[in-house]
Amino acid sequence: MPLLDHFRPPLYPRHQWTSFHSNWATRIADALNRRWLPPGFLAEEYTTSGARLEIDVATFDERSGGGERNGPATTTMQAPAWSPPVPARSVPVVFTDTFEVRVQTEDARLVAAIELISPANKD
């Protein structure tokens, strides 16, 4: 596959890196799986864009709610106002996009990786 510069006019700025990389990773993985990898290996694209946020703690109320109430109705008090503490330190951060093709064995052992780069993540 020839390496061409698709991000100079007339294609750029009409076409964006994220779309190009997403498509390219899929096509590379498909070509590896169809023509190049031996049995027992699988290529898959792995992409992340921007910040990846996760919940640290989650709670669920699993009570049925269908039972009888005990005693008279109750009054609910309003919770006191709360504001988060001031951070001790604040630093700028950049959440980079990741576009990779990972090759794994049937037991999910990583054996190869291809990282697609752009001007923003080439360092």
Image: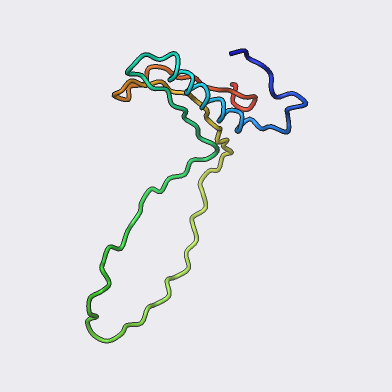
Q: Nearer the viewer, residue 44 or 76?
A: 44
- Name the outermost residue toward the bottom: 72
Residue 19 sits in quarter? top right
- Quarter holding the C terminus? top right
Q: Nearer the viewer, residue 103 or 84?
A: 103
| Residue 50 screen position, x and y as percent | 55, 38
| Residue 76 screen position, x and y as percent | 37, 78
Residue 96 sits in quarter? top right
Residue located 69% across and 19% down the image: 5
- Left or right of 116: which side holds 4? right
- Name the outermost residue toward the right: 10
Residue located 73% across and 27% down the image: 11
Determine whether 72 is above or below 37 in the image.
below
Residue located 77% across and 25% down the image: 9
Q: Nearer the viewer, residue 81 or 10?
A: 10
| Residue 97 screen position, x and y as percent | 55, 32
Residue located 58% across and 23% down the image: 117
Determine whether 66 is above or below 14 in the image.
below
Determine whether 1 is above or below 59 in the image.
above
- Left or right of 5: which side holds 57? left
- Quarter holding the N terminus? top right
- Name the outermost residue toward the front: 34
